[in-house]
Image (cartoon, coloured by chain):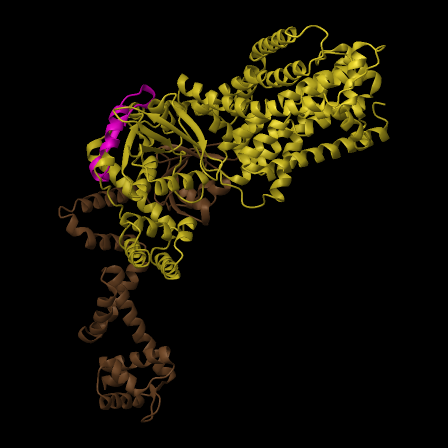
Chain colours: A brown, B yellow
């Protein structure tokens, strides 16, 4: 009974393979399917019949195999799950691409569907949730690669310290949201943290070379007497920028000292 | 003997690099040009600690991208000339930004030594460095120096020799997993395609390719590598959400802040340094402008008031010299050689030398302002105005210098980074009325205008010049030099007490260049002009005429006189006659010659701008409107042959120099024509 609601793992594999073959070669032949999945032709025929019974594929012996609309939806779901699992291993767990690909295939069989679905959800959550986010994941990737070179885990301590001070800062700010602005919006005396440089090209590069990079603290010191270039303090020195350049630097305002 | 040990000096602007260069080489310096560009290349020989060292002062840069000429020249020198060692002068009071260049030098794969300069200043800011630990982390030798006191220089040279002899390995900057993967893939490709490239350079090339460096991209022509680079760039942007250029900059600063976190200790939280306090007043919202104007007035007072007595001495000395030379020939004998010596050579050289006090004083003032750090503030204050014209705040300095003399002004455009800004400034600077035109105004204004009008008249002439310069700059920016304006990303360096030696070298560097360039050109031109105003000679002059009238007759007969006559139909619509035309030809050598030439054609003998008889003649022959037109034409037309020659040198092209000459002459003609015709029609000053 369950078969009608959820597909067996092997049938999912068939569906996935058919979908990929159609995308690559425009048509799927049972010979190609057998080759891909390293199974015999008769088992392919059996599987195709099973899929046809569920109205997921259109299949006539010795002809081309096509997906029904329902089959395509189902196949896409499977492919996406495979992709997300693989991405999770590559991006979050810092595992090589080939290994991740193979493992993702096998995971679909060995791990219960419920767990796989949860993992997929988690991978999506890690990528999108602002509380963990890409930075945190990169931290793990760095740890995996550099752990051997850093047995005392000094960098961990540094990282944790940084995190704690960040948390403290966040606490001090209370519930006030950090207004995002550009450097141009900051008034003399106000401080901020560089979020990113907008635009591109030589101007952006020049500004970055001068130390105006993501994460740097910046203070607007003054505006020129005639009102245009501004004098900012960054990395302990004074830099002057025109307002039009300052408008291309996104900052988050920091509270006054 | 093999080739000399070559040491290249690199460093940020304002890091004290020049001071160290001067300490190393003393007077044994020579200034040349980098091939193909107009950048100055300073070299010198030092014999500190044994064998002679050839020291090359690279242009001061913050980075090594392909965007600015300085940076391209610096890195090309390192890659192509392969100096034995590169000493990077690091300003320790601004460590992180200075190390950004150091990190890039390390990546180039040459032996690098860091000279931690001005450590005393950093100490006063409450910074303490663990130099040994830092040296270990970065994998390069570090030597503390104090450039202006000459401390640590010997140690620096010793470290440089050692670094060149023992191939030291600088630490490799790691850019994180994703970037490293891309670098690795590109290096592998490069290895296959261009196996002759040395290993450190492969990594550097790979990074530069990811950074989209136009120049490096051009050297790697294989399509496979280019395709791979594009693919990796897209991948990195997708994964990390920023362009690889930014990621690389982040990575370098990340490495630096890692090193600094472990080795730099800040003992005092020194938020307001002395420099900050000075700035609170000097570039204050309200006081900034008056202080700036006051300082500029001071520069002018120094140049023109203080410069007056020595100018008179020089004039006196040349007067004495020409008299002495004249006495060598018996009275009454008309020797051509005498004429050549006195009227050509001595007058020509004297004409150049007489401005030397002005120019040296002006450069003294600029050197003090520059070395103290005020010049950057001046640009900061003036940028709003200059930007409106489409120029950079730094263009203000050449414009200002132009009030003194166009030659140093054109040379002062070297501080401008973009070629577009530089050429624009260079081309319009002669419109700012220079000191040599002042004698013309001084002669003409009192001749035609009542006392009450004299000062405003002079002011109007200067304002017209500046207004035309602004208009022309704008015009050039929307026609020939269209395009994005250069960003105004400029460091405001901390104020520093200038050293005597530094100012002295600065002043003579430029003053000497003026002497050499203007001197040789003006000398040659004066001889040509002397010939124009001498040949063909009039053999039999009317004996009945006075000596002055005879002189005038002779001049009218010469080539210059003939050209003047020939020009008359052309300049008639401007209200000018052949006499003015002849004087204008003389004025091409140097503007102030106009007065003397006019004196000769009007046969009043020796004339200067105070000459009443000449004014009398002018009043009788011309209307005030013509007087105004003479001043306008002299204001707008090219100041002198030397200006054009300097433009040719600084722009590295005869095309631009001739364009300037033709443009200014045409502009002068059109403006004067309009003023004279409109004035006559309205019945002004007839």
Q: Position of residue A33 (x, y in %)?
A: 28, 83
Q: What residue is rendered at 22% in x and 31% in y?
A: B131
Q: Nearer the viewer, residue B111 or B130?
A: B111
Residue B301, by quadrant, is top right
The answer to which quarter of the image holds residue B127 is top left
Q: Quadrant of the C terminus of chain B?
A: top right
Residue bounds of the magenta highlight = B135-162
Measured as percent of width and height from the top left, residue B376 is found at 47, 29
Q: How many discs mark residues in the rendered view?
A: 0
Q: Position of residue B238 (x, y in %)?
A: 36, 59
**Residue most extreme to the bottom:** A61
What's the residue at 66%, 13% (across, down)?
A: B338
Q: Is residue B510 visible?
A: yes
Report whether B47 appears left or right of B472. left
For the point 22% across and 71% down, the residue is: A102
**Does any portion of residue B272 appear in the rendered image?**
no
In the rendered image, the residue lying farthest to the left is A152
The quadrant of the picture occupied by the N terminus of chain B is top left
Check if residue B216 falls in the magenta segment.
no
Magenta segment's dominant SS is helix
Q: Is residue B605 left or right of residue B394?
A: right
Q: Position of residue B26 (x, y in %)?
A: 36, 21
Asked if residue B152 lies in the magenta stretch, the reply is: yes
Q: In the figure, B315 relative to A251: above or below?
A: above
């Amino acid at each position: 009974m369950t078969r009608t609601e959820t597909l067996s793992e092997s049938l999912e594999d068939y569906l996935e393979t058919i979908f990929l073959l159609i995308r690559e070669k425009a048509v799927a032949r049972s010979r190609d399917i057998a080759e891909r999945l390293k199974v015999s032709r008769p088992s392919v025929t059996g599987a195709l019949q099973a899929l046809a019974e569920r109205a997921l594929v259109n299949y006539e012996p010795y002809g081309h195999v096509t997906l029904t609309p329902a089959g395509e939806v189902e196949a896409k779901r499977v492919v996406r799950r495979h992709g997300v699992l693989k991405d999770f291993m590559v991006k979050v767990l810092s595992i090589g691409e080939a290994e991740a690909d193979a493992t993702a295939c096998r995971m679909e069989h060995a791990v219960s569907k419920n767990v796989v679905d949860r993992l997929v959800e988690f991978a999506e959550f890690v990528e999108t949730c602002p509380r963990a986010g890409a930075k945190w994941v990169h931290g793990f990737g760095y740890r995996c690669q550099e752990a051997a070179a850093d047995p005392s885990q000094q960098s961990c301590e540094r990282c944790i310290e940084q995190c704690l001070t960040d948390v403290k800062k966040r606490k001090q700010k209370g519930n006030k949201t950090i207004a995002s602005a550009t450097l141009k919006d900051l008034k003399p005396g106000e401080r901020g943290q560089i979020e990113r440089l907008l635009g591109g090209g030589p101007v952006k590069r020049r500004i970055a070379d001068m130390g105006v990079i993501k994460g740097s603290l910046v203070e607007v010191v003054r505006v020129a007497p005639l009102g245009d270039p501004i004098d900012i303090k960054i990395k302990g020195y004074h830099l002057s920028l025109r307002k039009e350049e300052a408008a291309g630097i996104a900052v988050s305002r920091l509270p006054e000292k | 003997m093999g080739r000399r040990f070559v040491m290249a000096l690199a460093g940020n602007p304002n890091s004290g690099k020049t001071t160290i260069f001067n300490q190393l080489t003393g007077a044994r310096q020579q200034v040349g040009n980098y091939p193909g560009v107009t950048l100055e290349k300073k070299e010198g020989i030092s014999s500190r600690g044994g064998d002679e060292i050839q020291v090359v002062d690279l242009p001061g840069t913050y980075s090594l991208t392909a965007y600015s000429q300085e940076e391209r020249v610096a890195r090309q020198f390192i890659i192509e000339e392969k100096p034995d060692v590169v000493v990077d002068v690091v300003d320790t009071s601004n460590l992180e930004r200075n190390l950004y260049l150091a990190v890039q030098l390390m990546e180039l794969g040459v032996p690098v030594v860091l000279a931690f300069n001005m450590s005393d200043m950093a100490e006063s800011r409450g910074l303490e460095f663990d130099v040994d630990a830092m040296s270990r982390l970065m994998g390069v030798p570090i030597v503390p120096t104090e450039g202006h006191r000459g401390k640590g220089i010997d140690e620096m040279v010793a470290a440089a020799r050692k670094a060149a002899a023992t191939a030291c390995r600088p630490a490799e900057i790691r850019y994180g997993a994703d970037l490293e993967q891309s670098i690795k893939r590109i290096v592998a490709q490069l290895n296959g395609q261009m196996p002759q490239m040395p290993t450190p350079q492969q990594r550097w090339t790979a990074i530069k390719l990811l950074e989209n460096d136009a120049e490096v991209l051009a050297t790697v022509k294989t399509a496979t590598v280019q395709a791979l680079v594009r693919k990796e760039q897209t991948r990195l942007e997708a994964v990390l959400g920023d362009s690889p250029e930014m990621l690389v900059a982040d990575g370098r600063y990340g490495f630096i802040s890692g090193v600094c976190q472990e080795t730099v200790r800040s003992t005092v939280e020194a938020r307001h340094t002395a420099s900050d306090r000075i700035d609170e007043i000097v570039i204050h919202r309200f006081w900034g402008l008056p202080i700036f104007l006051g300082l500029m007035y001071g520069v002018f007072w120094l140049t023109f008031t203080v410069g007056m007595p020595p100018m008179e001495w020089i004039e006196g000395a040349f007067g004495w010299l020409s008299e002495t030379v004249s006495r060598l020939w018996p009275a009454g004998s008309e020797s051509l050689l005498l004429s050549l010596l006195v009227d050509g050579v001595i007058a020509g050289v004297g004409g150049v030398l007489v401005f030397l006090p002005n120019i040296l004083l002006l450069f003294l003032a600029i050197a003090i302002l520059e070395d103290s750090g005020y010049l950057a503030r001046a640009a900061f204050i003036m940028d709003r105005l200059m930007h409106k014209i489409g120029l950079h705040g730094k263009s203000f300095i050449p414009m200002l210098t132009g009030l003194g003399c166009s030659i140093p002004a054109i040379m002062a455009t070297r501080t401008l980074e973009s070629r577009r800004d530089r050429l624009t400034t260079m081309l319009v600077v002669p419109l700012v009325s220079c000191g040599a035109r002042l004698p013309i105004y001084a002669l003409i204004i009192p001749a035609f205008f009542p006392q009450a009008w004299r000062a405003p008249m002079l002011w109007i002439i200067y304002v017209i010049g500046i207004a035309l310069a602004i208009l022309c700059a704008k015009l050039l920016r929307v026609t020939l030099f269209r395009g994005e304006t250069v960003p105004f990303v400029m460091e405001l360096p901390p104020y520093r007490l200038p050293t005597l030696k530094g100012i002295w070298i600065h002043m003579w560097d430029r003053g000497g260049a003026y002497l050499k360039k203007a001197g040789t050109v003006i000398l040659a031109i004066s001889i040509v002009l002397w010939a124009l105003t001498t040949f063909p000679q009039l053999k039999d002059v009317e004996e009945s005429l006075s000596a002055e009238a005879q002189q005038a007759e002779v001049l009218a007969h010469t080539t210059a006189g003939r050209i003047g006559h020939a020009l008359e139909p052309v300049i008639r619509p401007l209200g000018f006659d052949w006499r003015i035309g002849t004087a204008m030809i003389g004025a091409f050598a140097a503007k102030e010659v106009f007065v003397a030439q006019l004196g000769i054609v009007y046969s009043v003998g020796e004339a200067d701008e105070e000459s009443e008889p000449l004014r009398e003649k002018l009043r009788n022959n011309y209307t005030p409107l013509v007087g105004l037109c003479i001043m306008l034409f002299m204001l707008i037309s090219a100041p002198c042959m030397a200006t054009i020659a300097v433009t040719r040198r600084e722009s590295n092209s005869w095309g631009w120099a001739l364009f300037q000459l033709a443009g200014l002459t045409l502009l002068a003609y059109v403006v004067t024509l309009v003023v004279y015709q409109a004035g006559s029609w309205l019945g002004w000053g007839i």
